[in-house]
Amino acid sequence: MKYLIGMDGGGTKTHCLLTDENCNILYECSGGPSTFLILGTEKVSETLAGLIQESTAYLKIKPEDILSVVIGTTGAGRRSDAEKLERDFLVYANSIGLPINNFHVESDAKAALEGAFSGQPGCILIAGTGSIMFGMDEEGAVQRVGGFGRFIGDEGSGYMLGKKGLIVVAKSYDGRGGKTILSDLISEKFNISSSEVLITELYRNNFDIASVAPLVLEAAEKGDEAALAIIEQELDELMLHVKAMREKIKTPVMDISFIGGILSNDNIYSRKFIEKIHKKFKDVNIKKPDSNPAFGAVLMAKKQCEVQ
């Protein structure tokens, strides 16, 4: 019997699925993050190799029995970057005696799109740490909106919610803004209660800005005006993503699935966004993904075998 492996890589973990040739899941595991543009290809290669070794050891199969391995991961949107991880992983795998020949790197968004609609037309809006929207039309052409990163993009993402939440708190500290529940929430969770500590955490200790996003949502749930304003601003940005994609995808009805904890979970942010979509668009249908991004990577691995 031969096998396939699909992985979904992100900033916090890498989700791995091992299946048979018919995509029946036989083993599932998780490892560390695989943001190779940040962590480097060597560190990420070590993580990926470890997941492959764990999966094959569990089933007592040889790595040579793996027909194809595909990982959809953050930072692989540019082919040149994806190819670097492909090359470096194969070098690392060879150095530890792990014979993997058919290894491909794709963007996390493409793997998520494949999994959400099982290869059929549809759109995904990813709003996690960052944000991007992908859609596939009836001809199989893939369209993209957003995805310009935190410096000039990532609208509606956890990063932007967290960043704007910290801006509100910073203004509150020195009197440029009014009081906000966010100040207390950030103090309780992160022990940040002054401008001096905030600056130190941000610029010396590499504070995770996106980790503030859940607190912005919590403050909004409690009626905090500043937090509610942030939510409205960022939802309007996501609505622009949907509007732009609707103009690109020429189908009678555009199906859309949400990926990423901010939108896929039930909270004030996702509820308000669904309300906005229903009010603005009569030809956009919100549906749950068929499967997760790791399974989307499995489907892509199967296609890789069919192409060869």
Image (cartoon, rainbow, N blue to C red):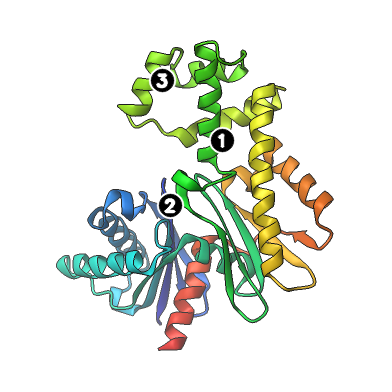
**Dot in front, 3 or 2:** 3
- Asked if the residue at tag 1 contacts the one at tag 3, i.e. Cβ–Cβ closer than 8 Å, the answer is no
Establish if 223 lies above or below 132: above
Whether residue 112 is visible: yes
The circle on residue 10 is 2
Mark 3, residues whose alpha carbon is within 10 Å: few (<14), some, or many (≥20)?
many
Whether residue 288 is visible: no
Q: Residue at x 56, y 69 (%)?
A: 114
Snapshot quadrant of residue 87: bottom left
| Gap between marks 3 and 1 measured at Cα | 17 Å
Q: Amino acid at mark 1?
A: Leu
Snapshot quadrant of residue 249: bottom right
The residue at which mark 3 appears reads as: 198
| Gap between marks 3 and 2 measured at Cα | 26 Å
Among numbered discs 2 and 1, the one appearing first in the sequence:
2
Establish if 278 lies above or below 178: below
SS state under label 2: loop
Q: Amino acid at mark 2?
A: Gly
Residue in front for this viewpoint, 268 or 49: 268
| Residue 194 relative to residue 144: left or right | left
Among numbered discs 3 and 2, the one appearing first in the sequence:
2
| Gap between marks 2 and 1 measured at Cα | 19 Å
The residue at which mark 1 appears reads as: 161
Residue 80 position in % (x across, y down) = 33, 68
SS state under label 3: helix
